[in-house]
Amino acid sequence: MLTGAAPWTVLGVPVDSIGAPAGAPGLGTELAPQALRSFGLVAALAATDAGDLDVRITGPARDTASGLVGGDTVAPMVTEVRRATAELVAAGARPLLVGGCCAPLMGAFSGAADVFGGIGLAHVDGHLDLYDHVTSPTGEAADTPVGVLLGVGEPGLLAASGPTPPLRAGRLRVLGARDQDEATDVAALATRLGVVAEPPTRIAQDPRGAAARTLDCVANDGFWLHLDVDVLAADVFPATDYLMPGGLDLAALTALLGGLGGDSRLVGASVGCYSPEKDLDGRCGRALVDLLVGTLGTTP
């Protein structure tokens, strides 16, 4: 049975794939869960607050063995997120995982799939997230979630998200990707896997239509929704680490997410890549809370 009509449970995952020095204070996207709580996210969603997971990606150097920044701290994070997500959905909750970067998606989606089986993924992101531990220019785990979920990536991450790939390309839609360097780098892989992506220019023309097309593909047996805030134009949402030309405006993203977040087959959601350190007046954080409340709080 799907839990699409269940109340939201907010779970913080305070990680940043840049790899914080061990023992250092929180930085970057690690600060996002608490910041969004301070802007009233939990109360505005009438959600339960499950607190923050005790996870962190540490070590800013790219590990020579795994090829990942943070080395052997990444897979345990994925494992813990997977466990916690599965536990919530098995108990009838509908989790909203608040990152942090996008790396927790590997555990979040896998945990939901452990309970529900072959669910789909609506991936709203300025990137395809199809790099692996070798091809990623940065070595950051946030470059890799979609590839890992499709069964391509660093062995430790595959094991943490496995044992079999939890996602089929036919149940995936990537919405808003526009990184041309990434698209060139992973073009052959995207073609081989059958990844379908809609660019922001097409979405902006008809966001509700894009949502409907996505639901036709991903939602039949339930689906997960992931939002990376870098899908927004840089002048609309500058409080993120990967600013690029183009992107959606808030009206288009609101319409897109409204069409997805209001569907009763939505089993859970995650949001990543908001950096409070780049939002000193809180404007972006408040806008993000308004966006999430306005689009995820509408499920009948």
Image (cartoon, rainbow, N blue to C red):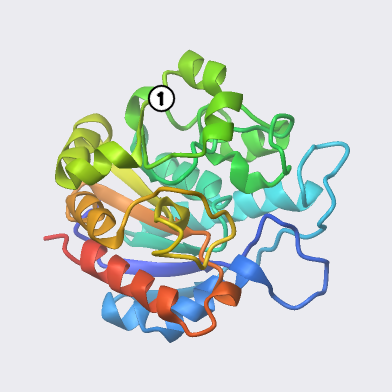
Please report the residue visible at 54 percent of the width from the left and 83 percent of the height from the top. Answer: 280
Instruction: Point out the residue furthest to the left here.
Output: 300
Which image quadrant is residue 31 in? bottom right
Q: Nearer the viewer, residue 281 or 266?
A: 281
Residue under label 1, please give it: 169
Report the amino acid beneath label 1: Ala
Report the label total.
Answer: 1
Indicate whether 23 appears above or below 93.
Answer: below
Residue 32, percent from left and from top:
53, 72
Q: Residues within 10 Å of mark 1 (few under 14, many from 20)?
A: some
Which image quadrant is residue 297 in? bottom left
Question: Is residue 1 at all visible to an observer of this figure?
Answer: no
Question: Is residue 194 at all visible to an observer of this figure?
Answer: yes
Which image quadrant is residue 176 in? top left
Residue 200, percent from left and from top:
33, 42
Image quarter in which the N terminus is found? top left
